Image: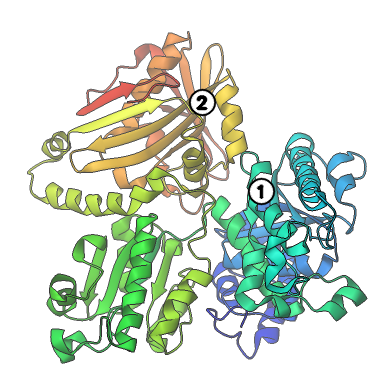
Amino acid sequence: MYLPWLRQPPEDFRAQVRALRDAPPDQATLRRLAATAMDLTQLAQLGKVVTKHLDEIARTSDFSRVRLGLIGSHTLDYIADALVATGLRHGLLLSLETVPYGQVAQAVLDENAGLKAGSVDFVLFALDAKFFGLDLPALGEGEGPASVDAAIAQAELLAKGVRGRIGAAAIFQTLVPPAEALFGSFDTQVDGSARAMVDAFNRRLPSVLGEGDLIVDIAHAAATVGLSRWMDIRLWHGAKMPFSPDATTLYADYVCRVIGSARGKARKCLVLDLDNTLWGGVIGDDGLEGIVLGNGNGMGEAYVAIQRLALSLRERGIILAVCSKNEESNALLPFKEHAEMLLREPHIACFIANWNDKAGNIRDIAATLNIGTDSLVFLDDNPAEREIVRRELPEVAVPEVGEDPADYPAMIARAGYFEAVSFSAEDRQRAEMYRANAERRVAQGSVTNLAEYLASLEMVMTALPFDAVGRARISQLVNKSNQFNVTTRRYGENDVEAFERDPAKFTLQVRLEDKFGDNGMISVIIFDKGPQSWSCDTWLMSCRVLGRGVEQSVLNEVAAAAKGEGADTLTATYIPTKKNGLVRDLFAKLGFTRTSEDADGTSHWALDLAGYEPADLPIKVNVLAEGQTN
């Protein structure tokens, strides 16, 4: 009921976890165990193993390490282990700093008794309506709105304390309304009822957030399972547990999916099976007229609902792909000719229909789209195919959707695979960008050499300093980019805002357009400015524009700016990770000289600006000052 999209843990779960206690567990094993509907006891068992081997797991895996402060108005211990284990499901390696419950203000505002400055990346406020004084009716004239004002002011004070003293981002959760209504159906019309005050607080909560702060919608989580099931009043009275043990599993998932999204771990692509997933029946056997799809038929309408969800996800920037065991000509037929089909060929960024194994085809989809397999969600009605993909690609999210297609949309939506912490115009265009990339691949095959192809693209690059408009997307790229990222340093929106104001930082956000469309923001650059030498802090680029000379064009702009301010050298460092081998030789290709190399493969580079000649490239460049628009 609480995590229905996850399969049940293996029968030998306890034995598997016990075997992990003495030796650091491998990433694949952790992913497989985490992708199950563990109960609270199982979450605690796995969480303790992760905490024990935290440093070793960090060195040998792709999980994103996050330090989380946990402050609450109720019992927290059982939540902590649940968060650590659940974090794995969302690509996170969590380490927690907990504060005794009830010590909320002290933890934030008292430097001697609270969380230490710089000790955590996020602070989660696990606070309920009782903490904010909104759990009991305030029925006097104006008392309800005044109580909400006071609660919002209290939340704002805590948020500012986290940002100012601790130097972290704050995570608030919406308040769960009471299951009981004092006035019945009239409750929401009385501004001093507990339900009305909680609703008002939740609506106003975003107003207290600063750059990089987050909200976890726990009120929605409770609503999905029912308010009467969310809280066990006996456990509240006896142990100050704010929700039932079973609900804790969903609570932890909601928290971790939001942090995961902030760290660039949200999924990017929905991979769809066809037969009995997007329509009923087998297109190769039943033909176009024989498949079940469309209005007037309960089952047919269920398949239309699946397609409608896929289209809605595409409109918010999720890439759609197809992976089907089929003859391609048969598989394409409904996309081209079925009148009730909502999805059409242009909606699909990568279409693979053949008789190869699906795990191999999914790898090909990821390679074609230039994204990691850990960015994929695979929807398939066939339990055997789901299990094969889980075994071969444990990093791919594979929901356990059951047998009724009417349940598929809810399973995908409730699972939080595509959790967002921001939504920009560029996010809205992302799926179309990937479709345009497919057209570029076709164009590349029609020309005789690379220079001709690049010239035919009619590229226009726009570079300008960091600003408020691009801040969210800059942070998103910094936290998501792994392959073309020389240092893989992660910065939140509050860090990006600080860079905007820092005169000792040189920053660039780079966009690229061509005749096929707008690629959006494709590169982020941060250099530390010194009097004679500028040092590269961050250089990342979207892999979808590799091989077009953009990196050389970016260097032209950095070099020109550095020389213009009197510097004579650029220095840079390549810090190797499991995913960024792509840029191991970037600086050598750009003309830098290797100055040293550490035992772990970290290499250091320098470029003498006196002898640097800008490369002549088929890219028109617009360099804009802060506040300018193209």
Percent x, y of residue 129: 79, 60
**In the rendered view, how is the structure colored?**
rainbow
Percent x, y of residue 263: 56, 51
Percent x, y of residue 52: 75, 65
Hey, what amino acid is under mark 2?
Phe
Percent x, y of residue 258: 59, 57
From where the camera sits, is residue 630 visible?
yes
> In this orientation, which residue lies closer to the viewer: 515 or 53?
515
Quadrant where the C terminus is found in the figure: top left
- Residue at the extreme front: 141
Does dot 2 land on a helix, a strand or a loop? strand
Q: Which residue is mark 1?
A: 204
Question: Callout 1 environment at 10 Å: few (<14), some (14 to 19), or many (20+)?
Answer: few
> In this orientation, which residue lies closer to the viewer: 52 or 538?
538
Q: Which residue is mark 2?
A: 527
Left or right of residue 495, residue 447 in this image: left
When asked about the image quadrant of residue 587, the answer is top left
> Residue at position x 46%, y 53% from top?
579
From where the camera sits, is residue 546 visible?
no
Hey, what amino acid is under mark 1?
Arg
